[in-house]
Image: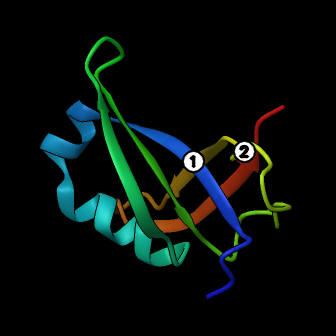
Amino acid sequence: MNTTNIGKFDVSMDLIEREPRRIAEIFSLIEFCPVRAECMLVRRTVEYVGYSPRFDPVEPHMMTPEYTLTIKQSKYGNIELVEVRRNG
């Protein structure tokens, strides 16, 4: 895994509590390797930082970019696509 492809994103605590297997499936689909997870109590999210080939390469000493993950599901509830978009 290329360690220059680092990024961060938030996942709601409600989703984590309701569907932990779904979160694991999404992480697998984008080949995400978390290196930090921080509970943000005020926002009721967990902020994940880690590596994924779906993230843009980042130069050393640069800020870790934030991403938005958009999940597309089939009518049967199966994950069909995970879009990864860099914010800003």
Looking at the image, residue 14 sits to the left or right of residue 65; the answer is: left
Badge 2 is on which residue? 65
The quadrant in which the C terminus is found is top right
- Is the Cβ of the residue at disc 1 closer than 8 Å to that at disc 2? yes
In the image, residue 63 sits, relative to residue 40, either above or below, namely: below
Neighbour class for label 1 at 10 Å: few (<14), some, many (≥20)?
many
Where is residue 34? Give x, y as percent. 42, 64
30 and 50: which is toward the camera: 50
7 and 74: which is toward the camera: 7
| Mark sitting on residue 35 | none
Quadrant in the picture for residue 67: top right
Looking at the image, residue 56 sits to the left or right of residue 24; the answer is: right
Where is residue 16? Give x, y as percent. 22, 45
Q: Amino acid at mark 2?
A: Pro
Q: Amino acid at mark 1?
A: Lys
Q: Whole-Å distance between the Cαs marked 1 and 2?
A: 6 Å
The quadrant in which the N terminus is found is bottom right
In the image, residue 75 sits, relative to residue 79, either above or below, namely: above
Badge 1 is on which residue? 8
Quadrant in the picture for residue 46: top left
Neighbour class for label 2 at 10 Å: few (<14), some, many (≥20)?
some
Residue name at image x 28 percent, y 21 percent: 44
In the image, residue 81 sits, relative to residue 47, either above or below, namely: below
Residue name at image x 19 percent, y 51 percent: 19
Residue name at image x 32 percent, y 58 percent: 23
